[in-house]
Structure formats: C-alpha cells, structure tokens
Image (spheres, rainbow, N blue to C red):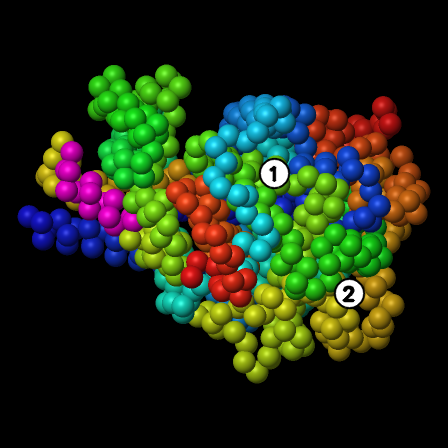
Amino acid sequence: MLGSLYALLSLTQLATAQAAEEPATGLADSAALRATVYGTPPQDIAPLPAIVPLKQINIALPWARPLPKILWFDRRLRVWLSLQDRPAPLAIVIAGTGSDGNTAKLSILRAVLYGAGYHVLTMPSPTFPGFIAAASSTGVAGDLMQDGRDLYAAAQAIIARLPSSVRITDIDIIGYSLGGAHAGVVKSIDAVEQRLKIHRAVMIEPPVSMFDSIGRFDRLFTASIGPSESDVDRLYRRVYVRLANSFRAADEVRIDDTDLLAAAAAVLQTDADFSAAIALSFRLALMNMFFEGDLYAGTGVVIDPRHPPLPGDSTEAIERALREKSFSEYFDKVFAPYYLAHRPGATRESLIAGIRLSVIGDALRKDPDYYAQTNADDLILDRAELDWLKATMKGRIAVYDHGGHLGNLGDRRQVADMLDMLAGRWSGAGQ
Amino acid sequence: MRVARLALTVAVMCAALAGAGCATGDFSMRSEPPQTPAADNVAAVARAQQLQAQVAAAATAVQPAAQIGEPITAADVPSMQTYDPWERMNRFTYRFNARFDEAVFLPVANGYGRLPDPLRLGVHHFFANLSEVVSVINYTAQLRAGPGVRSLGRFVINSTLGLGGLFDVAQKLKLPGAPTGFGATLARWGVHPGPYLVMPLLGPSTLRDGCGFFADFATSYAINIANLYRGDAGWALTPLNAVDVRSNTSFRYYSTGSAFEYDTVRFLYVRKTLIEDEGLRLWHRAGKSDPQTPAGK
C-alpha cells in the first residue's frame, strides 16, 4: 500500500514541482507550456555523478512562531546536505514556490553541483508549508526581504551546527524560480551583515514582479479551469474519464508506479490541459501558503481564529474553500492586513514593491557576483520584465531561446553556464 | 519460547521508540540512502523511450484492444468527495503511522538498506516469489487464465532455476511479475471499495482491500509453503517482508509539510483504486452514478 502511495505522491509532485510555480502569462506558445509541464527531457540532462551521499538535517529554530497543533509534524525545519570528504565550497540551493528542499529539480542541481566538487545544502522555499511553520518569524509568507531574512538566519543556524569535520572553503547561493529571487535577496542581506560571506549568487529563472504576474496567472486559472468549485470539478471529471477509459481499454490490467505516471502524462493533450495543470499546481501551492498565513495572522478568511482546526478534525471544507482563492485574495485579505498592522509606515504600494525583484535592483546592477539564467519564453516573465532583467544584469545573464518555465533546468547548457558563473569564469559566450 | 521471542520483540521496539525520542531534539543529522543520479537518469531515458513507443503504437492501433463495455463519461465519475465515515479514527491512525515510521520503521529500513545490494535483492525476490502463490489463486478466482499461467510459470521457474526465489530468472525470460490479491478479486466481481480505511502500520487502504490483505495473508498461512509461515522462523517472516517493502518505498510521511496531506493522500489513493477497478471489473453497471455520493460508498 505504501508503494502505490509513492506513485501517487510523485504524481502530485510531478504537478507541483515540474509545472510552473509562478504566474504564467497564458499567452505562451505550445512548446513553452509543454516544456514547463514535462520538464527537461532526461536525455538532455547534463552528466551526473554515479553516487551522491545524502544527509537529512532536522533543526528547531528559536524564532519560529508557536506551532499550531494541526501542524504538529512541522516542528523542525528539514533540509538536505551532501558532503564532500575533503574541504570544499558550499552551494546553498533554494527551491521554488511551495516546494520542499528535496524536489526532483533540486536533486538534479544537487547532483551536478556535487559532481562539480561542492558540498550541497538544499533548502525549501520560504513559501513551503514546513518552512512557514518551522522557520518563518511571521507565519505569513511572500515578502521577499522578510522571507530572505528567515532563510538567511536558518542557513546560519544550520551551518553553525555542522560537525567540525566539515570544512567549507567558500559559500555560493543558487535558487530556481522564486527561489532564484530568494538567492539574490539572501546574498544582498549577507553583503551587509557579512555572517556567511556568500561569494556568488546564481538566480535561475527568477520572477521579476510576482505581484504583476499574479493577475495574469489568476486569469490563466480562470481561462483554463474556471473561477469556481464546479469548474474544478469539471476538470477533475475530464481527467478521471480519460484515465479510467485508458485502463478499461487496456488489454491486461497491470498498474505499477510507472504505468500510473505514464497514464497521467498521457492524459494531458491540449494547450488548455497544460495550462490547467500549470494553473492548478500553483493553486495547490498557494492553498498551503494561504492556510498557514490565515492561521498565523488570525485573519479569519478560511479559519475561525477562535477555533482553529485540531489534528483529528476534517479539513475538507477548508480545502474546498481554498481551491477558489486566488493570490490577490491572499494579498488583500491575509498578507496586506498582517503587514500593514505589523510594519510601521507600510502601505499597500510599499508591500507590492516588496515582492518585486527590484528591491535588490541596486545590488544586482552594481555587484558583479550576481548572475541570472532565464528563457525568452519563460511563462513568468513578460517582455518588459525580461528587458528589465537584461538591463539590470547587463552581461551577467544567460537568456535561452526555449524552455518555458524551468523546462530546461539541468540540461547541459544551463548546467555548464551555471557552473561557469559560480566559478566566476562565465564569459557570456554563445549567447 | 514464543513468549520469550515476543518479549524480545517488544523490548527492541521500546528501545527503538526511546532512541527515536532522543532524535526529536532540536537538531539531528542522519544519513539517507545515497542517491544514484547517473543510473536514475539512464532509467528515465529508457522509460521515456518506452512511453514514446507506447504512444506511437497506440496512435497506429486500429482500435483499442479489449475495450470493456462502453467508455465511461463525465456523468459516471464518482464525486470528488471520499466516503470516509471513520475519518477521526483514520486521521489518528495516519498520525500514529507517521510517528511509528519516523521512530521505528524508517530507521530499521535505512539500516537494512546498508546491507549489500545482492542480499537485499535476493530477499526482495524471495518475497515476490512467495506472493506468486496467492496471485495464482486469485487470478484463477478472477477467471484470468493468461496472467494466472504467467504467475504459475514465474513461481515454478524462480523456485527452481531461481534457487528458491532468490533470483528473478523469469523476469529475464520476459515474464515480468504482476502480483494480484483478494482485494482485486473482489473488485473483479463487482465489490465496491467501501469506506476509506487507514490501517495501522500498513497505511491507506479501503475496507475491501484491507480485508483482501488479511485474506491473502491467511491463505499464505494456510498453504504454509515449505513450512515457512508456521515453522520455527515464521515469526521473522512478516517483519522482514515489511522491512523489505519499506526500504523499497520512497514515500515519506508529511514530506508535503501540508495540513492537507491526509486529504490529498485519501483523494489520490481512492481515485487510483477506483480507476484500477474500472479495468478489473467483469461487467459495468448500466445506471449512472449519483455525483453527490462520496466516492467509494
């Protein structure tokens, strides 16, 4: 029974980890949508090492908010570490929206970085529910600088607890998607505080303006799925029918993990299907962020602050309500009320500005140790945002023609450029 | 003697639980099985090619093979809600399982994972071979001659050429394993999954498949092949089987970090069961299902 569970959860991970995590424009071409959902074809992946050792670290962080009973399993932050057996530079890698520190994409980055001689520490996104509970000082995720500070503090706490046999010669930071923005932010904080002395940062396909993209993304959800519960139900029926009929048509029923995955992959056919998968995966990530934000901030949108759910309680009604909630509702009803109350002088405009990459625009412009990689057809960027990124990063950005959002992460060229950037020898040749 | 063994087992479990208690401090660092990215990627390339070949074959096929009845439509799809009348107990059991997994099951499975590959593979094949007996019986009860004969063939080949099941020779002869059980037999004859059920230690199931699991175990115990189940070492068989299964399963409780994990697992597990049933059932009801009825009821 556990075996089939793994297949099922990898299905959800297929959706949440491989699909776009940031808002998509909905205007992208078919190839970009497909690349976004399927990810890098395995035959295009850069050379990988045979063996990568792995340790799981669990750490309780003193600044975390008191743990609500329903999140009993999230007491400690969980990160993963791969150690070289000799002194080596440390690469800190941060996951994208809503993702844990051990996604398939992080596994690829971990493998190539370990193969290139780094110790590798992979960390969840500050928007991952386990991070919000165990490592956020606010419980309300989304503010780039605040989330960056929590990440920075967590990284310090982890490195401080490593055994003395681990010798770190230098520290670099990398992140993909929203994690790319966090990587940049953490380096900018460190540039002032100097506690880790982070050398270089590589931002892989970061969003430029999460807030502006959100509107486009919510429209994609509405366009490909529909605004209400009944539309989600219709999508569910469509997928179920296709899967069930493919099993009924099967000559012989043999369902193992790979069959189920293959069947699920085969169900997606049209651009609308791919858009729906992308929109839904973001919505699933948002549901957790929304739930915990509402729980910690006590804003009462889906959770009664006087009677929060307990471990034995059904959460189905809350989950159903959250399926219909867009990011703009999260911003207006949870995020903004919390920060307006807790940050003196904050305005709605200052909060929106706080989730743009331009909060570290000066550092990105002036410090030669920031690098970026992105795709010309990335779903999370529009033309103006891509231009801003190019103008800001000047010669320190690689822009690939195709890949959608993260559909080329781990391919030979992306990896070769990333390793060159980390080594400070990237020349921009071949652009 | 049996009492002494039982006492020993309980003592080991208590010690493991106590040890796990220490591991729940403010900081812990523990080794996981090493990753093998190069080999995994080679396997992924092979799978992708296989999938492409399947898609190509499906595109050129004149008509789908052995379509069972009319294709279902959106109106036949069970509701997104799941029939879970024992939810409070199930959530409690899920939580217990998560803690047991963390404290006992995973540490033991990880320790077991450090044994040499050929040894673990031998154990894995051994249990897979034992399960062929139950599969043959159930395929017969399902009136499915082809897979039944294949399971029988696998059992004969692997028990002899495979040295008592330690090697999967049949796999190399292009006879891959396809285990089945009493739950599937019930599904074949039209029994619905019934309420969602989280079984202690075993995890998500349904009432039907939970009963099927125990029926299969009882069958194995009754047949008692090579006196394995009721012999002197019978007490070690089930735990070893469990450890083998766990060490081959990547699932981690609460890896989603989400308060909705129970709901997500329940939704996916029951949908997977229902979709498998679509392929198993001998006949299909003519009437449309009521979209308001929770799935599994």
Q: Furthest-front residue in view?
A: B286
Query: Which of the pair B229/A98 is nearer the observer?
Result: B229
- How far across and down, in percent of the image, does residue A330 sit? 72, 67
- How far across and down, in percent of the image, does residue B204 sit? 40, 54
Magenta stretch contains residue B214? yes
Q: Is residue A31 left or right of residue A58?
A: right
Query: Which of the pair A177/B290 is nearer the observer?
Result: B290
Q: Residue placed at 75% from the left, 68% from the top?
A: A329
- How far across and down, in percent of the image, does residue A323 sit? 65, 63
- How far across and down, in percent of the image, does residue B289 sit? 50, 58
Q: Residue A421, located in which quarter of the rendered image?
A: top right
The residue where tag 2 is placed is A328
**Above/below status of B83 relative to B125:** below
Helix, strand or loop at label 2? It is helix
Q: Chain of mark 1?
A: A
Locate the C terminus of chain B by quadrant: bottom left
**Residue type pointed to by label 2:** Ser
Q: Residues within 10 Å of mark 2 (few under 14, many from 20)?
A: some
Asked whether the residues under marks 1 and 2 belong to the same chain, the reply is yes
Q: Residue A157, located in which quarter of the rendered image?
A: bottom right
Q: Earlier in the sequence, mark 1 or mark 2?
A: 1
Q: Are marks 1 and 2 in contact (CB under 8 Å)?
A: no
For the record, the magenta segment spans: B212-225
Could you give the CA–CA distance between mark 1 and mark 2, rounded to whole angstroms?
Answer: 30 Å
Q: Answer yes or no: is residue A34 visible.
A: yes
**Residue type pointed to by label 1:** Ala
* Principal secondary structure, stretch drawn in magenta: helix
Q: Chain of mark 2?
A: A
How many tags in the picture?
A: 2
Q: Residue placed at 82% from the left, 59% from the top?
A: A215
Magenta stretch contains residue A5? no
The residue where tag 1 is placed is A265
